[in-house]
Image (cartoon, rainbow, N blue to C red):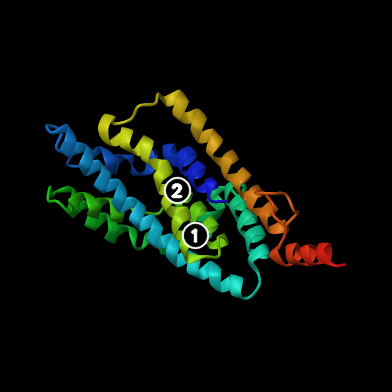
Amino acid sequence: MLYTALLLGLMGSLHCVGMCGPIAFMLPLDRGNRLKMFSQVFVYHFGRIAAYALMGLAFGFFGKGLYVFGVQQNLSIFIGILMILTIIIPQKIFNKYRLTQPIYKVISKIKGGLGKALQKKTADTFLTIGFLNGFLPCGLVYMALFAAIAMASPLEGSLYMALFGVGTIPLMTSAAFLGGVLKTPVRKRIRQLIPIFVVLVGILFILRGLGLGIPYVSPAPVGEVVTAEIECHEP
């Protein structure tokens, strides 16, 4: 399921450009030195991916705790359903019940840190900007974090989020260098495809949890595989 992280990042990167693009546009790049400019953008992306990986590590630990209690299969199904529900439930419902209000209490602090970092051009500036950028609230990041929980492993959760970050690099780099490369109709079309792709990822996680014995998509639970092998070797 790790491949879905890269695809989610690639498909969702246009959304990322919409949310984080202004930060990428404002990066204090040294445009007079192309090599230095590329290195600055690389450090910025490294900071973002480090933040994603750190969150993936934490959520992976949480998923591992649930796995210890023997609920990994059900957890995968639950995460898949949750992904789908976040797409089909109107945004106004979330706003009505203020389900995301606690998250926005930390935004002002993050933005304050970003504002200070954007005014500097020191060696660590781009790492700081990227790292803080990674913690800004984002619907696509939430989807990826749901998946990181379902990995039920700190290492795989961290890797999942890192791959998600890698998937966002192409368009985010274009935003930093060119200020946007896609025309409005193309952006609109891709934005319309993002919810469909998230639903498909959710379905994949549901299938994974069902353990239907489909290789790479819905592998059978380990216990069933072991039992089948024992039966095959019985005289």
Is 198 situated above or below 74? Answer: above
Q: Which residue is mark 2?
A: 164
Residue type (three-letter) at the residue carrying disc 2? Phe
Q: How many marks?
A: 2
Residue in the picture at 48% in, 30% down: 188
Q: Residue at x 46, y 39 (%)?
A: 10
Helix, strand or loop at mark 2: helix
Q: Residues within 10 Å of mark 2 (few under 14, many from 20)?
A: many
Residue at 14% x, 51% y is 123
Q: Position of residue 176 (x, y in %)?
A: 27, 36
Is residue 182 shown left or right of residue 114? right
Q: Position of residue 157 (x, y in %)?
A: 48, 60
Q: Report x, y in % for residue 208.
A: 67, 54
Can residue 41 be seen in the rendering of this structure? yes
| Helix, strand or loop under label 1 | helix
The image quadrant that residue 64 belongs to is bottom right
Residue furthest front as drawn:
235
Q: Position of residue 20 (x, y in %)?
A: 34, 44
- Closer to us: mark 2 or mark 1? 1
Which amino acid, by three-letter code, is at mark 1? Glu
N-term-proximal mark, 2 vs 1 = 1
Instruction: Classify the position of the C terminus by image quarter.
Output: bottom right
Inter-mark Cα distance, 2 to 1: 12 Å
Few, some or many C-alpha atoms within 10 Å of disc 1 (few <14, some 14-19, many ≥20)?
many
What residue is rendered at 51% in x and 70% in y? Answer: 62
Disc sitting over residue 26 in the figure: none
Residue lying furthest right in this view?
Answer: 235
Observer-nearest residue: 94 or 86? 86
Question: Which label belongs to residue 156?
Answer: 1
Q: Is residue 211 left or right of residue 120?
A: right
- The residue nearer to you, when weighing 108 against 224, is 224
